[in-house]
Amino acid sequence: MRLISLLIVCLFLTGCSWPSLLITPIQYPDKIEEVTVASGSSSKIAIIPLDGMIANARVGGGVMGQSENKVALFEQQLAQAESDPNVKAVVLRINSPGGTVTGSDAVYELVKRFKERSKKPVIASCQELTASGGYYVALASDRIVAQPTSVVGSIGVIFQTFNVTGTMNMIGLKSETIKSGEMKDMGSPFKEMTAHDRQVMQALIDEYFARFKGLVGEHRHLSGNKLDSVSDGRIFSGEQAFKLGLIDQLGTLEDAIDVAREMGGAKGAKAIMYRRPYGPAGSIYASSDAPVPEAAGGVNINLPESALPLPTGFWYAWRP
């Protein structure tokens, strides 16, 4: 601090101007590099994070532009783990409230196909939040580990829209829509939802929910009333989820890595992560940020994602 104050005084006395800074935007490099986050033998356990909202799209990433597509990055990290013979198992470090129906399903399929091709075990480690689409992805793993305080569940589907017709009428605005068919603007915030609209939308919701619920039943060996009781959209603590059979064991990320070493037959294996060349490193929890939403212009909003309304669409997402 004293050095900064001295610099300011020197600049003032000498009449010098402030130094200029040149900010040059760069694109994300194609390659990812391996970083060791826990030492061990030559065998490896790859930790692959799944943080924030899951969507097959690029979203705001700051005032200078957009971040990368999370699904694309996830696929690249899985591919690198698959091609490396020294990687004996993968730990999915999940901290997500879910995401779009299709984005969540895409990541689930990536994990499932990775297991089929590589024959390498996958362990899901639930962090603060593994809800809805995040839990949907965890179902594809061989074992799910959660901390007692993790938030798990929210099995279900949600579609949100708005009806602004009342407000528009108050200020004298009217929306005019030219459409090719009766249902083309179904779910529009500029019209009242008809009974037919609601029926069609509910049919889609029911279809997506049946898929989610079916996967829970298949992977967690649940059925009947027990399956119904965990599939009404509620969330559970890790402790509750364990008792209900939604997860396999309680434990930290370190415990999940130990499970991966055991299942991968790689006792003492080191833990690694994949980074872009400029990304931070240092520990197994590096870059495990709490989800932060981003506005359309790329400006970060200092609110939890769950505090903001969902864009229109079908979501496997927890929305308190």
Image: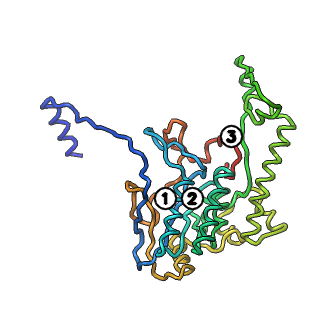
Residue 312 badge: 3
Q: Which residue position holds label 2? A: 95
Q: Which residue is farthest left?
A: 14
| Measured Cα–Cα span from mark 2 to mark 1 | 8 Å
Tag 1 or tag 2, which sits nearer the N-term?
Answer: 2
Q: Residues within 10 Å of mark 3 (few under 14, many from 20)?
A: some
Q: Quadrant of residue 211?
A: bottom right
Q: How far across and down, in percent of the image, does residue 218 sit?
A: 75, 69
- Seen at 72% across and 16% down, the residue is 172
- Seen at 43% across and 39% down, the residue is 64
In the image, residue 83 above or below residue 162:
below
Element carrying mark 3 = loop
- Seen at 49% across and 65% down, the residue is 80
Q: Amino acid at mark 1?
A: Ser
In the image, residue 259 above or below residue 71:
below
Tag 3 or tag 1, which sits nearer the N-term?
Answer: 1
Q: Residues within 10 Å of mark 2 (few under 14, many from 20)?
A: many
Q: How far across and down, in percent of the image, does residue 114 sit?
A: 59, 67
Q: Amino acid at mark 2?
A: Asn
- Whether label 2 touches label 1, CB < 8 Å: yes
Residue 288 badge: 1
Q: Amino acid at mark 3?
A: Thr
Tag 2 or tag 3, which sits nearer the N-term?
Answer: 2
Q: Residues within 10 Å of mark 1 (few under 14, many from 20)?
A: some
Q: How far across and down, in percent of the image, does residue 81 sit?
A: 50, 68
- Seen at 55% across and 73% down, the residue is 256
Q: How far across and down, in percent of the image, does residue 86 sit?
A: 46, 75
| Measured Cα–Cα span from mark 3 to mark 2 | 23 Å
Left or right? Give the position of 162 relative to 288: right
Element carrying mark 2 = strand
